[in-house]
Amino acid sequence: MSSNIGIDTLIDLNGNIVQQERGYWIEIHVWRVATTALIPHGIRYALTMHDMSGKRVMGYDNAHAVKPSGRFKFAGQVLPYDHKHRNISDVGVPYEFKDAYQLLGDFFADVDRVLKETEK
């Protein structure tokens, strides 16, 4: 499946802020960039969820590389830029970008997860 599927739809969402339950909100930023080995799908993105004070509580982005967890050395490896932050203190874990629709589906599934966790 091509990673270009849904890119235009995702770009159309750029700048959107969507209110959620209990004062949470999400923000979407997406723009085209040159296709490179690090950004093969040709977009930069930041999909974030914030609490009522504005603090990011979860997000998906490709603003920087993330080292996979583990004890192995990563010298000479190309580290993935696509990643997600699962909670406030998470420095990021790799995310496998398949296409824009999958990205949106995964992000909103995590939004639902965070909202459900905050009900407790």
Image: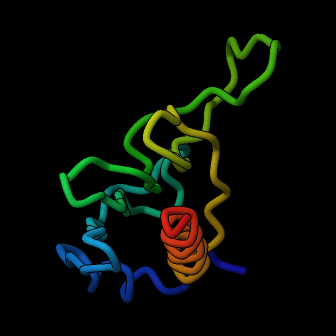
In the rendered structure, the answer to whether residue 100 lies left or right of residue 69 reads left
Towards the viewer: 115 or 46: 115
**Residue 97 image-quadrant placement:** bottom right
Towards the viewer: 4 or 25: 25
Q: Relative to 76, does residue 119 appear above or below in the rendering? A: below
**Residue 45 image-quadrant placement:** bottom left
x 63%, y 52%: residue: 95
x 52%, y 42%: residue: 81
In the rendered structure, the answer to whether residue 32 lies left or right of residue 88 reads left
Q: Relative to 51, does residue 72 appear above or below in the rendering? A: above
Could you tell me residue 85's position as x and y percent?
51, 46
Quarter of the figure with the N terminus: bottom right
Towards the viewer: 47 or 7: 47
x 54%, y 50%: residue: 84
In the rendered structure, the answer to whether residue 52 lies left or right of residue 73 reads left
Quarter of the figure with the C terminus: bottom right
